[in-house]
Image (tube, helix red, strand yellow):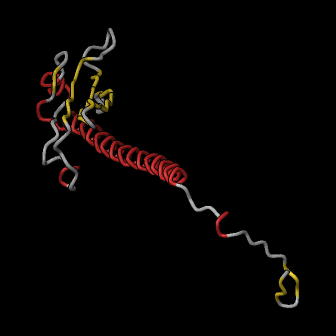
Amino acid sequence: MRKVFGKSIAVLSAPLASQRGVTLIESLVALGLAAIILTAIMAMVVTAVNTSTSSKTRTVATGYANEGSEVAREMRDAVDWQTFFAQYVSPGTVCSICQVTSTSSLAASGVSVTPYTRTVTFSDASPAGNPQSRVYVDVVVTWKDHNKDEKVELTSYLTDWHK
């Protein structure tokens, strides 16, 4: 017994020979557990970064698809309905001036154009008995993300809104 600040404290002491240090096996087990935990953490970080990058590219692609829909509307509004229908709406007509280019509004604001391809297709969607009254517009933006083909597709209908 020892007295510390007026109180008795029991002190157990073992002979130096019976005290054991950390063995080699314990050290290897601890290092193995640390390696497994660090590997799991790194895998989560890599997954988070890949998901973030994929989300960003999908958001940009959606912007290009919206822009394609707007280009189709502008084309409709630039001429009268009959001219628009005759120029662009034979079955399955692909709009050659609707491609993603460096002059696209998103590209002009600094968004990369490189991995994206946009296709805008017009087709006649007029109901029976009302010819040349409605146009189906299909906008598809494709790109490669981590060697996987991705796409965003928007569809809309255009009508002669001046009537």
Could you tell whether 26 is left or right of 130 in the image?
Answer: right
* Residue that appears at 54% across and 55% down: 23
On the rendered image, what quadrant is the C terminus found in?
A: top left
Above or below, comparing residue 22 to residue 44 in the picture: below
User: x, y (%) of residue 131?
Assistant: 26, 14
On the rendered image, what quadrant is the N terminus found in?
A: bottom right
* Residue that appears at 16% across and 21% down: 93
Which is nearer the eye, 52 or 78? Answer: 52
Above or below, comparing residue 26 to residue 6 in the picture: above
* Residue that appears at 29% across and 23% down: 136
Which is nearer the eye, 38 or 63? Answer: 38
* Residue that appears at 32% across and 31% down: 154
Above or below, comparing residue 67 to residue 14 in the picture: above
Which is nearer the eye, 151 or 148? Answer: 148
User: x, y (%) of residue 109?
Assistant: 22, 56
- Report the residue that reaches farthest toward the bottom: 5
Q: Quadrant of residue 143?
A: top left
Above or below, comparing residue 31 to residue 127 in the picture: below
Q: Quadrant of residue 130?
A: top left
User: x, y (%) of residue 52?
Assistant: 37, 47
Which is nearer the eye, 136 or 148? Answer: 148
User: x, y (%) of residue 155?
Assistant: 33, 28
Instruction: Give the total number of marks visible in the rendering.
Output: 0
